[in-house]
Image (cartoon, rainbow, N blue to C red):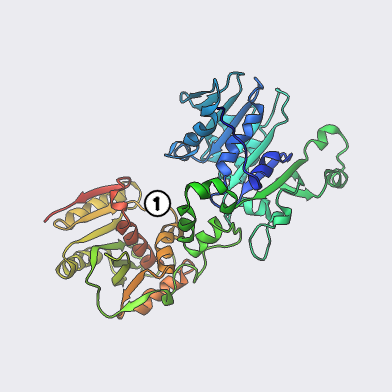
Amino acid sequence: MPTVIRPQPGPQERFLATPADICIYGGAAGGGKTFALLMEPIRHLKNPGFGAVILRKNITQITAEGGLWDESFEVYGKMRGARALQSPRLKWIFPSGARISFMHLERDEELFKWQGTQIVLLEFDELTHFTEHMFFYMLSRCRSGCGVTPYVRATCNPDADSWVAKFIEWWINPNTGYPILERSGALRYMLRENEEIQWGDTPEELWERFELKTTEQRHRIKSVTFIASRLEDNKILMARDPSYLSNLLAQSVVERERLLYGNWKIKPAAGLFFKRSQVIMVETIPNDVIRWVRAWDLAATTQDENGDAAFSAGVLMGKRKCGRYVIANVINVREKAADIRKLVRNVALVDRKNFKNVCIRLPQDPGQAGKAQAESYIKYLSGFTVKAVRETGSKTARAEPMAAQWQARNFDVLIAEWNDTYFSQLESFPESRFKDMVDAGSSAFAELEGNAFDLSGLLQWEVTN
């Protein structure tokens, strides 16, 4: 029996039916965005001159397990005569000669490689990962000699700080940040003049406003739409993986609003990550802790950007047999580098006496100097279980996993004199001037949740009895 590939009713169907020159689709996770991108070129695959390019920020996002390239086999791999090529670049070629290329674009400096190209269908997977300059430069590469009018399709998840949020603001409620469903799929018209975007409700409005009289001038007008989708629109995914909804519900407030509800206005703000009212205070340390880690955030310099002494922080965190987490000790001090080294070792001795096996996790700064410092620390801490890890991503992104469990009330905190200082910094994060205790906690949580088995960024892993 032949395989039938068709869009799901609702937003995915509207995405594939829109006549817009530029259509941005999504605004939440799990709405079937990537599959829609892969289906869009199908209508042109009998055209021998047709060529589509699907872009992601980097090659890993394309080739990762279950990523864009793997998903393409679910669509194109079922088509008779379709061939998948991996060299010199990822590409599907069809019997007519039509082509679909999978490429990446990481930096503005790489745009020169696209000079002279002609792209009939240009698709961006996760548009917020690209700069505005990238988008409009690549728009200039949309040309055609095959009879298909060039056009652009893009998907995205919400990012309040991205240029995309400004670009689609007409489709978004300014008060709630949620898409205005009545406007989803509605066309507007755009003219980009001196790097400024001018909008109109009709092309004629822009013709008159800017006195565009010739056909060539009027072709500068592009029709644009935004089509909102959410997980509930993807019935197939909901049936195949009912647990995906619970995964989104388990996120922190900020990520849950973005990924589950498609909120374009929410940003990390004080009080949205951690609140002291969300934990259980305990007088004694639970006796069912199965793993301990002391993570450090070490001051890179003796002074911060304002000339004040910088802080170093160490958070002792454990994971309990019941699945909860406990914070047993937090250290937050301003000391010289040599004194911090002694402190780290002295604390390691105390932790070992009190809790026996405690993993020590240290940050490794980028570059050779950071590697040298990490090696020095590991040698200095000989006899302890210690590792140095290169932290990646923003401070807020690293805090999200811990914040999700914190907000789910899965943390216990030992009553101690450091509580108020610790809670004050957490509750003011990410707007707080200092974030050292948050960073140390995020690192400890990452270690407890299995990142010990992620060897990327691992400098050394020393285990001694």
From the image, tell me which residue sits under label 1. Answer: 392
Farthest front residue? 1
Asked whether 430 or 2 is in front, the reply is 2
Residue occupying the point 25% across, 73% down: 286
Q: Is residue 53 left or right of residue 250?
A: right
Residue occupying the point 62% across, 26% down: 51
Asked whether 97 or 456 is in front, the reply is 97
Residue 280 locus on image (x, y percent): 36, 76
The type of residue carrying mark 1 is Thr
Asked whether 4 or 137 is in front, the reply is 4
Above or below residue 110? Residue 95 is above
Q: Residues within 10 Å of mark 1 (few under 14, many from 20)?
A: few
Above or below residue 355? Residue 158 is above
Q: Is residue 434 left or right of residue 224?
A: left
Residue 181 locus on image (x, y percent): 69, 56
Residue 17 locus on image (x, y percent): 70, 39
Above or below residue 73? Residue 364 is below
Q: On the rendered image, what quadrant is the N terminus found in?
A: top right
Residue occupying the point 66% across, 38% down: 152
Q: Is residue 398 left or right of residue 444?
A: right
